[in-house]
Image: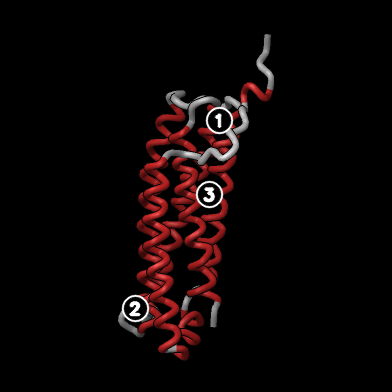
Amino acid sequence: MPQTASALSPEPAAGRIPGNKGIWAGILSEMTEFALLFGVYFIARAHYPEVFRQGPARLSTLAGTLNTVMMISGSYFVAKAVHAIRQNRQQASFRWLILVLLAASGYLVIKMLEFQWNLSHGVTGGANLFFTVYYYLTFTHMVHVVWGMMGLAWVLVRTRSGAYSPQDHEGLEAFASYWHATDLAWLVIFPLVYLLH
């Protein structure tokens, strides 16, 4: 007798936190790190308002926008991957995770091209305080994306091997939670350094 949809995609228990305690300790550390960097941004901006008003005009808004598209797309794809596993569709989940990998790779390629463009236009970390803060924020975020991609590689292997099921997919949820947190950090960085004049 075929299983019902509710048996394949059990609703998470009320009050249940997705993933595991370890990933949430990591996310808290990540958010604390970015909160400190955002604090530095606002303190520096208060002391050097003109430099921070002029800085975004020298950056590539197109690169920042494309990176935002990559990050949001990756979050959408990972949410679809979790949804597919809850419906016991491992192959579909794997395909969604491949799309996450492509979005993350696209982010890195765009970021590297942006840094090259910056350097060719004299936008270096030592140009002024705005660019120092810009590089600290964006490079730190890029490092977190790379860490996320390392987690993604593990989740891809586990998904491909059939390790996750509708009842047991904590590892996939943990990765998804980390990716969403990294995406959230970028959604704060983007307007601060590319748009706020």
Which residue is outermost to the front?
Answer: 15
Residue topped by disc 3: 74
The quadrant in which the N terminus is found is top right
Q: Residue at x 57, y 51 (%)?
A: 73
Of labels 3 and 1, earlier in sequence is: 3
Compared with residue 118, is residue 35 higher up or lower down, i.e. above or below? above
Alpha carbon distance from label 3 to label 1:
17 Å
Measured as percent of width and height from the top left, residue 112 is found at 39, 63
Which residue is rendered at x = 54% and y = 78% of the image?
196
Question: Which image quarter holds the C terminus?
Answer: bottom right
In the rendered view, tell whether residue 142 sits above or below residue 153.
below
According to the image, label 2 marks what residue? 124
Rounded to the nearest angstrom, the CA distance separating label 2 from label 3 is 29 Å
Crowd around label 2: few <14 · some 14–19 · many ≥20 (10 Å) = some
Depth order, front residue of 41/109: 41
Reading the chain from its start, which is encountered first: label 2 or label 1?
A: 1
Query: What's the amino acid at mark 2?
Result: Thr
